[in-house]
Amino acid sequence: MSLSNLPAPTPTPDVAHGTEHAANAVTGNAWVGRFVRFGSIVRGIIYLLIGVLALRLAMRGIHDEAMTPSGAISLIGQQPFGRVLLVGVCVGLAGYSLWGLIRAILDPLHEGRSLTGIVDRLGSAGSALGYAGLLVVTFQFIAGPLPHIPAPHDWTAGLVAKPFGLWLIGIVGLAAIAGSVLGEIVPGWRGRFASDLDLDRRSPSERRWAMRLGRVGIVTRGIVFTIIGIFMVGTAFHANPHHVTGTNGALLGLLRQPFGRTLLASAGLGLIAFGGFSVMCARWMRVRVAPR
């Protein structure tokens, strides 16, 4: 028997029962459900703003705010009652970070211990860490002026000078490309995200919109993350940390291509679709333990 045909390890009945009981207890709490759903709304608003910033640059040439999650949070803080709004952002980011931890540890949607399930759960853990980092940035913004957010080339510049630093950047870049293609673009195009949604009680029209927004939005975000990974591999290959430029740089990279304004506008509309999908997931998402 080849290694690829070996069955995925299964937890013992006691462990499986204990984990499912814990998942039921956590996800069955009404306040946890509200907390997580509000987090999905806040995540959606952040991506809506990134998409609007990209669309504004493509159509009007205005680039006064970074097209990144931290840039979107900064924009929220600049509005009337900005600090009050940022408190709400903090609550939402905490809620979505918690949801990532719940999915990674308790596996309420039964993603399992197959290779695909483990990758999905690791992705949920990474999501939890990422939104926790944004939560820290938002806290700092509430406490005073927006802190300096290191650009990707800030930390890669340090790695380039270290032994094996270029190898590490290249490996992370390749992992980002693989994760984006296999974890977002392919499943998004195939509509695999539908298993995370509770659409049985929705109208046919609402189900169609859920699939359209999810497919366009998730694939677009996956493409943007893939471009970021390509920049990282470019940094490793050319030993130039300025190749790594994050979401803002990936979108600016689209603008520099032939038909760049059209490409950037398309990416902006796709990110707006993802933001709308995330906002609506407050209604559509499956938070309680999924039936086996």
Image: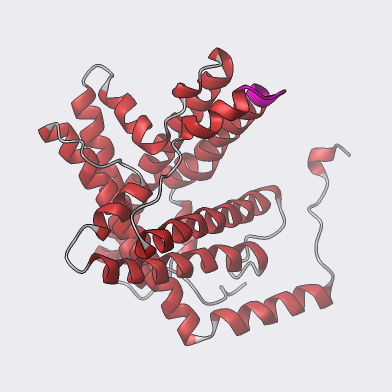
- The residue under the point 56% across, 73% down is 290
Residue 135 visible from this viewpoint: yes
Is-magenta flag for residue 208? Answer: no
In the picture, measured across the screen, residue 104 lies left or right of residue 273, that is: right
Figure quadrant of residue 182: top right
In the picture, measured across the screen, residue 279 lies left or right of residue 228, that is: left
Q: Position of residue 157 (x, y in %)?
A: 54, 26
Figure quadrant of residue 194: bottom left
Camera-side residue of 179 and 151 = 151
Q: Position of residue 203 (x, y in %)?
A: 28, 71
Figure quadrant of residue 135: bottom left
Q: Residue furthest left?
A: 60
- The residue under the point 39% across, 42% down is 221
- The residue under the point 28% across, 72% down is 84
Is-magenta flag for residue 162? Answer: yes
Q: Position of residue 97 (x, y in %)?
A: 51, 64
Q: Residue furthest front?
A: 144
Q: Position of residue 172 (x, y in %)?
A: 61, 33
> Which residues lie in the magenta part?
161-167
Location of the N terminus by quadrant is top right
Residue 212 visible from this viewpoint: no
Q: What colour-coding does the image apply? A: secondary structure
